[in-house]
Structure formats: C-alpha cells, structure tokens
Image (cartoon, grey):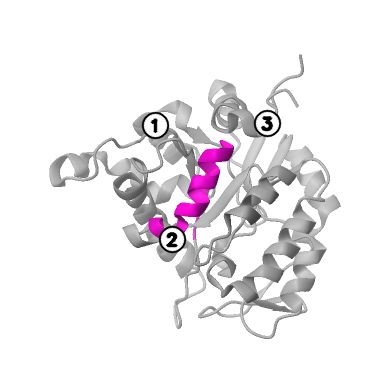
Amino acid sequence: MKRRPRVDVHQHLWPSSFVDALRDRSNPPCLDGWTLHLSGEPPYQVDPADHSVPARAALAVRDGIDLALVSMSSALGIETLPADESGPLLDAYHEGALALPAPFGVWAAANIDEPDPRMLRDVLEAGCVGLQIPATALADPAGLDRCAPLLEELERAGAPLFVHPGPAAAPGAPAWWPAMVSYVGQMHTAWFGWHEFGARRFPRVRVLFAMLAGLAPLHADRMAVRGGPAGVPAPGVYVETSSYGREIVATVMASLGEDRVLLGSDRPYAVPLALGGSAGVRLRTGNPARFFSNCIDPNS
C-alpha cells in the first residue's frame, strides 16, 4: 500500500488562462502586465516566478509536499462580482487549474451572490476537492442564505468547504493592514458566524478555516465568561496553519484538538510550517486524510 500523501491545503498558483482573463479586464480586479489592481488597495507588483508551474512544483518537492491544493484566493473579490463579470474569470481559473500537473490539486470557486450549484457540481465532478468561499460570506444569516445552494451541493457531493479571507479594501492604510487586521477579523467573524448560523443548518458539511480562523479558537475562556454559540467547535470543523509558527499552532492544537489542524502555507506569500515528529505527520498526512475522506485518494 502506498503511503498517504503529505498535503498543503492552502496555496495560490495562477494558471496562464486565469492571468489572461485578469489582463482582459480594465476594472479591478485586473492585471496590467504583472501589476495587480484590487478595489480599495494599492497596486501590487506580482512576481511572475510565483506563478511558474515548474518552479512551484519544484518548491513542493523541496517542502516535502505530495499534494498542494491551490485556490483562486477570495481576497481578489471575484466571487462577489456580477455574474457576467465573474463568469469568465471563474471559467478561466477552473480550466487552467484543473489542467495543472502533479502535485497540484484544486479548490473550486463560485459566485456567492448569484450562486450556480450546477456549475459547482460540474467542477467537483471534474476534480476539484471542495469549494472555497470568502470569510465575509459567513458573517451573518443573510450570507448563509445566499450561499445555501452551494452548501447544499457540497452536502450532496460529500465535499468540504474552505473559508478564506475575502476582499479587504482599506484606502489609506499601510500595505500590511489587510493581512494583519482585515483578514484576521474576517476569519474570526466567520468562525463564530458558522457556529451560530451554519453548523446546525449544514451539519454534514466539513469546514476548513484558513489561518487558524484568525485565532478565534483561542477565545474559549472569554466565551465561557461572556457567552457565545453552543457546540464550539462543531463536528467537522478544522483549521489550517498558514502564516503561523510552531508555538501558536501548538497552542491552537491544545485548545481545539490535535486532530483538527491541517498544514496550510499560503504559498507564494508564506512558506509551510516545518514541524517534525508525530505532530508534523498529523498536520500533513493524518488530519488531511480524515478531513478530505472521499475527496482525495489517501493512498495516492
């Protein structure tokens, strides 16, 4: 029997079809050459090497990763564009990402304001492991209502949900502000939003929160004093480690449960956590196999 794959659940890699689709646009989100323009954020100079398929495949080998799951990144703001604008970008992303060679796998993306569960079914059947949505979609009951057709399709397919930071317009703020303030707040809100509004409504959906859910799992003591949603953490809820180091990951594992934390790096913006021993095996191998169950072959 082959060994289970070592998995990084959170990477970003733009296939050429997606790059071309972004360059075809004149309004954000768009690319001018390799300069990325997003609404309310300063222009960002993209390094082309970050989206070189051979270079990224070589990095995965160096990192000891057998399966690197790429997502479109909800921070681009594509999932909330009007359907006639998001459609070409989503099609270009799925077409290119699903054609990527090993070691890459793919998270699906979808318009969350005008959801199309048939499209989601098609890309899941084509090979996507699950669906990414922006954390902002889980902030309130109305957001859950809008996403409901997509979540129902995930339940039908037995596929998981990946919650990723969404757009973070902050005009006049320093460049680090979205990553340190906006994204953390979004993930924190989504964690509690899911437990209050989503977990009982969609009990069969397994959910993975990026970046340790903004450290929301560490607020158990405050919840005990001030109140909060019942049943935290809900069954089937996991987090991944992107951008955090050993000490904070160990603290979250102690609070949330060592079986609920997966390795995620957020490459090309950060590198995978290097954690050895049984904890490293659990993060990269055992916990992903449990989380994805029928979505990936644990012996591939």
**Which sits earlier in the primary sequence, circle 2 or circle 1?**
2
Mark 2 is surrounded, within 10 Å at the Cα level, by few (under 14), some (14 to 19) or many (20 or more) other residues, namely: some
In the depicted structure, whether residue 104 falls above or below residue 170: above
In the depicted structure, whether residue 228 falls above or below residue 262: below
Report the magenta residues as a range. 144-165
Disc 1 to disc 3, C-alpha distance: 23 Å
**Quadrant of the drawing holding the C terminus:** top right
Q: Are marks 3 and 2 in contact (CB under 8 Å)?
A: no
Q: Choose top left, top right, bottom left or bottom right for residue 290.
A: top right
Mark 1 is surrounded, within 10 Å at the Cα level, by few (under 14), some (14 to 19) or many (20 or more) other residues, namely: some
Three-letter amino acid code of the residue under disc 3: Arg
Q: Position of residue 296 (x, y in %)?
A: 67, 32
Main SS, magenta region, reads helix
**Which sits earlier in the primary sequence, circle 3 or circle 2?**
3
| Residue 17 shown left or right of residue 253 in the figure | right
Q: Which residue is pictured at 69% across the width and 23% down the height?
A: 4
Mark 3 is surrounded, within 10 Å at the Cα level, by few (under 14), some (14 to 19) or many (20 or more) other residues, namely: many
Q: Position of residue 262 (x, y in %)?
A: 54, 36
Residue hosting label 3? 6
**Quadrant of the drawing holding the N terminus:** top right
Q: What secondary structure is found at the residue carrying circle 1?
A: loop
Q: Choose top left, top right, bottom left or bottom right for residue 35.
A: bottom right
Disc 3 to disc 2, C-alpha distance: 34 Å
Residue hosting label 2? 146
Residue hosting label 1? 235
Q: Which residue is pictured at 56% across the width and 65% down the height?
A: 79
In this orientation, does residue 29 appear?
yes
Three-letter amino acid code of the residue under disc 2: Arg
Three-letter amino acid code of the residue under disc 1: Pro
